[in-house]
Image: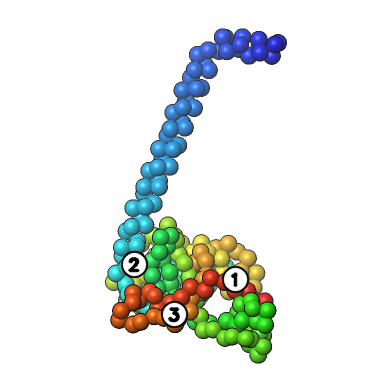
């Protein structure tokens, strides 16, 4: 009761201050959620702009992924920098999806080990139950892509995707692979050629079948 009495006394003595704090909190709360809604709207509009431009490019079209942080400094450079990565990387457009753009960035062979698991480790090649040619596909979120120049420039004459290299350099065999940035892709996924694709009648993206199994390096 004594504590409650003290609280009531404080409120009666500081009524104006309490109301002021309450009003300010109410305003701050609504401003925060209003700005969040505006931010989400801006993200959706940005996504649609990028998606629309990317969809003008056909499957397999060569592009350059340009590192925005290095573009005004030393583009085009073939030297990798410790923290920012390369100034640009070559890739091929695959398709757009709800959360980003897919790019073909390599072709590899994976192996199904006797225990049924899939691996990229070539040491399993001799004992593999199955060998599968796969397309290594990098995913870049729309918010990582700042701008697309479909015309390209004098250094490559291919479309340029200007973006932020926020991904991890998973392929590095040095300590750089532990850095959480320096590569354009947020994640790497794998596809194989579909065995049921009918060229000319099926959508071109059905040419690939997603490998929905874990693939290790072990």
Which mark, by number, is residue 194? Answer: 3
Residue 119, given in percent of the width and then of the height, sits at: 62, 78
Residue 10, given in percent of the width and then of the height, sits at: 61, 12
Which mark, by number, is residue 54? Answer: 2
> Residue at 42% of width from left, 34% of height from top?
31
Q: Earlier in the sequence, mark 2 or mark 1?
A: 2
Gap between marks 2 and 1 measured at Cα: 29 Å
Sort mark 2 into few (<14), some (14-19) or many (20+) by Cα contacts within 10 Å.
many
Q: Earlier in the sequence, mark 1 or mark 3?
A: 3
> Residue at 46% of width from left, 31% of height from top?
28
Residue 84 visible in the displayed image: no
Residue 134 visible in the displayed image: yes
Sort mark 3 into few (<14), some (14-19) or many (20+) by Cα contacts within 10 Å.
few
Q: Quadrant of residue 162?
A: bottom left
Q: Earlier in the sequence, mark 3 or mark 2?
A: 2
Residue 64, given in percent of the width and then of the height, sits at: 40, 73
Name the outermost residue toward the front.
Answer: 196
Between tags 3 and 2, which lies in front?
A: 3
Q: Which residue is mark 1?
A: 214
Between tags 1 and 3, which lies in front?
A: 3
Residue 106, given in percent of the width and then of the height, sits at: 49, 79
Between tags 2 and 1, which lies in front?
A: 1
Q: Secondary structure at mark 1?
A: loop
Gap between marks 3 and 2 measured at Cα: 23 Å
- Could you say which is closer to the camera, residue 79 or residue 191? 191
């Amino acid at each position: 009761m004594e504590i409650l009495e003290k609280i009531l006394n404080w409120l009666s003595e500081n009524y104006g201050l309490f109301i002021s704090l309450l009003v300010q909190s109410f305003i701050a709360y609504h401003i925060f959620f209003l700005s969040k809604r505006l931010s989400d709207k801006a993200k959706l509009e940005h996504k649609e702009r990028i998606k629309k431009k990317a969809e003008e490019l056909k499957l397999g079209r060569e592009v350059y992924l340009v590192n925005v942080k290095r573009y005004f400094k030393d583009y085009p450079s073939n030297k990798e920098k410790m923290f920012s990565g390369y100034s640009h990387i070559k890739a091929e457009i695959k398709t757009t999806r709800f959360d980003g753009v897919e790019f073909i960035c390599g072709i590899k062979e994976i192996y199904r080990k006797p225990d049924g698991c899939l691996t990229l480790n070539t040491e399993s090649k001799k004992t593999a139950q199955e060998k599968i040619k796969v397309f290594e596909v990098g995913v870049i979120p729309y918010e990582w892509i700042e701008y697309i120049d479909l015309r390209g420039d004098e250094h490559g004459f291919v479309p340029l995707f200007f973006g932020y290299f926020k991904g991890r350099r998973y392929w590095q065999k040095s300590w750089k692979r532990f850095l959480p940035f320096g590569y354009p892709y947020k994640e790497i996924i794998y596809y194989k050629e579909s065995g049921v694709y009918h060229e000319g009648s099926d959508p071109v993206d059905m040419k690939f079948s997603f490998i929905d199994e874990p693939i290790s390096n072990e």
